[in-house]
């Protein structure tokens, strides 16, 4: 690992990553089809909700674009001189931007798609097998699971762990721990969101009931 980068380089990498993550791909895609993604389905701006509420091709494109946002953030950070554990800062920033976009009143999606791009940028050889697992599970079992991207990400993560142990794609342990932390953060973020939306007894919240009674 190289010497510690300067604060200014870290700040620039984080700011760029945040604004890349905050580009509301799913929201804009929904608008193109005449739908407000925050008012339908899970009310999250993500590939899965677009897949279910808009169209499958649109959902695939949202997944690829959101993944590309994560990958681009890491490639830019690498261009600024960051590597190994320092890449976890822009990685965190791009996901935080996806969760809290200033362009959509600080709303967003889970961030699984962005995380796939982040991991691909940080550890490409170990990430490729996991990337295909996530895509396969998400597409193949979309109608069977409530949160197929999370299931796909969980299985993909297990494949990723195995891949990091391969001698042809060695990964710094601290990087694996950091990526694991990001995955856990996404899972907790999703759980908190859905708990708030459904309420303590499993019912849709009053605000969501109002939206369902008076759809836009």
Image (cartoon, grey):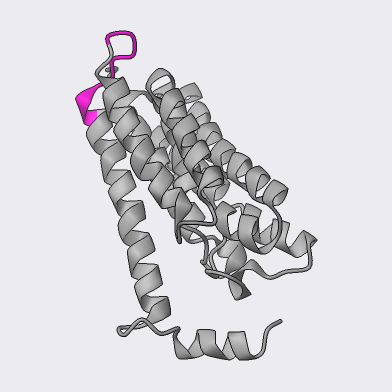
Residue 42 position, x and y percent, is 52, 69
The span picked out in magenta is 167-174
For the C terminus, the image quarter is bottom right
For the view shown, which residue lies furthest in the top direction? 168
Q: Please indicate whether residue 26 sits to the left or right of residue 186 in the image.
A: right
Tell me what residue is drawn at x 41 percent, y 30 percent. 130
Q: Please indicate whether residue 16 sits to the left or right of residue 191 in the image.
A: right
- Relative to 35, is 23 above or below? above
Report if residue 184 is visible in the image.
yes
Magenta-drawn stretch contains 168: yes
Question: Mostly what secondary structure, the magenta segment?
Answer: loop
- Relative to 59, is 194 above or below? below
- Relative to 43, is 115 above or below? above
Residue 146 position, x and y percent, is 45, 61
Residue 98 position, x and y percent, is 50, 54
Numbered label tally: 0
For the N terminus, the image quarter is top left
Report if residue 111 is visible in the image.
no
- Relative to 97, is 199 above or below? below
Tell me what residue is drawn at x 33 percent, y 29 percent. 160
Q: Please indicate whether residue 43 sits to the left or right of residue 130 in the image.
A: right
Q: Quadrant of residue 11?
A: top left
- Is 19 in front, or is 35? 35
Tell me what residue is drawn at x 71 percent, y 62 percent. 30
For the view shown, which residue lies furthest in the front direction? 144
Magenta-drawn stretch contains 66: no
């Amino acid at each position: 690992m190289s010497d510690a980068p300067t604060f200014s380089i870290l700040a620039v990498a984080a700011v760029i990553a945040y604004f890349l993550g905050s580009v509301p791909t799913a929201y804009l895609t929904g608008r193109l089809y005449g739908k407000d993604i925050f008012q339908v389905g899970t009310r999250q701006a993500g590939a899965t909700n677009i897949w279910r509420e808009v169209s499958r091709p649109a959902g695939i494109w949202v997944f690829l674009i959101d993944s590309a946002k994560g990958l681009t953030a890491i490639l830019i950070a690498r261009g600024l001189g960051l590597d190994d554990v320092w890449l976890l800062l822009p990685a965190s920033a791009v996901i935080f931007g996806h969760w809290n976009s200033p362009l959509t009143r600080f709303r967003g999606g889970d961030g699984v798609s962005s995380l796939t791009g982040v991991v691909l940028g940080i550890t490409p050889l170990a990430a490729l097998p996991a990337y295909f697992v996530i895509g396969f599970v998400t597409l193949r079992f979309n109608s069977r699971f409530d949160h197929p991207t999370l299931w796909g990400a969980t299985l993909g993560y297990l494949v990723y762990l195995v891949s990091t142990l391969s001698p042809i794609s060695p990964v710094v342990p601290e990087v694996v721990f950091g990526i694991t932390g990001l995955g856990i953060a996404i899972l907790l973020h999703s759980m908190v969101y859905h708990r708030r939306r459904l309420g303590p007894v499993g019912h849709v919240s009053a605000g969501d009931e109002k939206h369902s009674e008076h759809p836009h």
